[in-house]
Amino acid sequence: MAFQKAVKGTALIGGGAIATVFGLSQFSEYRNKHGALVQVQAAEGAPVRRDHLPTREQQIQALQTSGEFDVLVIGGGATGCGCALDAATRGLKTALLERDDFSSGTSSRSTKLIHGGVRYLQKAIMKLDFEQYRMVKEALEERAHLLQSAPHLSAPLPIMLPIYKWWQLPYYWVGIKLYDLVAGSQCLKSSYVLTKARALELFPMLRKDKLVGAIVYYDGQHNDARMNLAIALTAARYGAATANYAEVRHLLKSTDTGSGRQRVCGVRCRDVLTGKEFDVRAKCVINATGPFTDSVRKMDDQEVPNICQPSAGVHIVMPGYYSPDNMGLLDPATSDGRVIFFLPWEKMTIAGTTDSPTDVTSHPIPTEEDINFILSEVRNYLGADVEVRRGDVLAAWSGIRPLVTNPDSKDTQSLSRNHVVTVSDSGLITIAGGKWTTYRAMARDTIDTAIQEHNLKAGSCKTMGLQLEGAQDWSPTLYIRLVQDYGLESEVAQHLASTYGDKAFEVAKIAQVTGKRWPIVGKRLVSEFPYIEAEVVYGVKEYARTAVDMISRRTRLAFLNVQAADEALPRIVDIMGRELNWCEQKKKEELETAKTFLYYEMGYKVKTDQLTDRSEISLVPADIERYQKRFRMFDKDKKGFITILDVQRVLESISVQMDENTLHEILNEVDLNKNGQVELNEFLQLMSAIQKGRVSGSRLAVLMKSAEEKLRRRQAIPVDRSGGGL
């Protein structure tokens, strides 16, 4: 067995040497061709960037009155917005339509990594697969571009690969070093080996037994939804007519006078917010709809075979204490052969992803099975002193990866890990597959194809080196000016700078005065996160039109903590209602829609399902007696249940004030049969679920325990314990 492993390692080293030599030669060729152009391409020949961002209403008007466009992109994810930006910066008259919000699909539900793909490089070498090697090389080049084009939204991230067997050390070390070498001068930082002691110092939560050491390498990390939005906003500033909530109903076709064939010449569009329908005509229509690729292709030709094979990837978010602030973890081989990342993000910890076949849907839902699989894998790598609890899952989501087969390939059954650009007989261009990191290269290839196929007059790609929205005047110390000039909390200022870049000043200008000595401005939406009310106002300027847009893509509250997002919703809806002139009925609808989104798509349902009216009570008799006593401190009348009035009475007796709405929310979390009261059995089910780790952060449990302790401290000291007396 050891010999087989040694042979395998030797094969990797031999193959790695070949790949290294080839990679370096390819890198030299790339530098010779493109090296001098990286920073100047975007400046030469690109249209003027507008200072003023058009409103959504102005964009809808432009779609209706601007006549025929050169390029019309369907889809507002990373690839679609990338296509719009590429076309607009080449001087092409460009339009983009998205039926939901920008980044509402897969592009906001990623692992948040900007990476070349370590595992793909391993497969490329082991299988001598040149296509996978080329994909990794391109992704590493694009990784460097993405980090430079939006430095406020992205940063290098060290990722640790823990080693538990001696033979794995040279095996993985060679693979990671090849990853550095293929990146060439675009390598973020050189990888390195750590001793066991040093690995535990940097990642103290790591499982200690049998740990040999670790290897650390670097990839990039970003705020995916905000990055997608930055691409869309930059395209709009370069003149693209971009509109979210603009649904394509069907394709428009005309007969080519030369060939007599039907050609796609535009789309019938519906403004989802007003219901108004109108035509948008274009010389070239691009299908960049990710998992929905085939639905648009079938608008063109009902008989065309499907090329998209959707795969669901689930991620979970846990408290930040599960990982160091600036060190990720890679599990290269899970129990079923998949790869799991464990990464710090926005001061929380992301773990994922799964990979399983799924149906295409606009509303993918994370399953309890996938969540438990991820938790199980996380437990394998964390120390025994770190209890990985199901109740610590603060949010969970599922994203659909649009894996594709190439219809132009002889082997149409094999999945392509790279992107595929195809042109139908009627001229519809489809871009599918690929990955977040390579969105710019995918857009470049798509627009190159559009220019060639439709005889459009435009130059070469201008997006290499182009800075995205917020990046132009950003610096790592920008947040200090926000603190000094506006009186924002340091944490809030850092958040604004890393979210909006140089546009953070526009948010700070509209921030409300707090009425406190400090901070002077910036009212938080929820106390534990740095999101402020002014961001909701600014989010409307960034084309947010629903409460879901605000909690999931303008802010990332829904992805960080579903309960915090739920608590912030009423205030968010009130502010948006004021900005968008919503009536009371509309505000109520928005609130309900957003709560449904949190419940199903962001894991609130699977979180609340941990405590149901069928939950088993598995407490020892001593615990049952202790919790019954605690319950009876609130249930003075021995009714067998407690209500808001009971809790208010106890809180008043210990001089604690809490508004009725908050108390109602707290009790509602535990009120399983929703009858407005918490019965003893429900309370025991809660405490049992907490002991098992299935529920954490229960406000009622903490409140009752705290009240019990304060009441005990206030009890009179008996005479015999106070030194006697008369």
Image (spheres, helix red, strand yellow):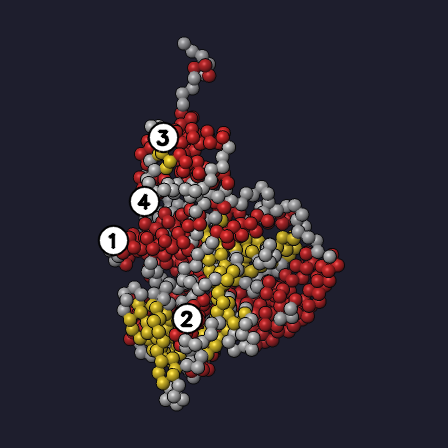
Nearest to the observer: residue 246 or residue 409: 409
- Per the image, the residue denoted by label 3 is 635
Separation (CA) of disc 1 from disc 3: 38 Å
Q: Closest to the observer: 364 or 161?
A: 364
**Sequence-wise first label, 1 or 2:** 2
Q: Specify the amino acid type for callout 4.
A: Gly
- Which class describes the residues within 10 Å of circle 3: few (<14), some (14-19), or many (20+)? many
Quadrant position of residue 479? bottom left
Kindly identify which residue carries mark 4: 515
Q: Which mark is residue 584?
A: 1
Under circle 3, the secondary element is loop
The residue lying furthest to the bottom in this view is 258
x, y percentage for residue 209? Answer: 65, 45
Q: Which label sits in the foreground, 1 or 4?
A: 1
Label 4–label 3 contact, CB within 8 A: no
**Comes first in the chain, label 2 or label 4:** 2
In the rendered structure, which disc, 3 or 2, sits on the residue that comes first in sequence?
2
Q: Is residue 65 visible?
A: yes
Decide: few, some or many residues near mark 2? Use Cα within 10 Å; few <14, some 14-19, many ≥20: some
* First reached walking from the N terminus: tag 1 or tag 3: 1
Q: CA distance from mark 4 to mark 3?
A: 40 Å
From this view, report whether residue 387 is shown above or below residue 234: above
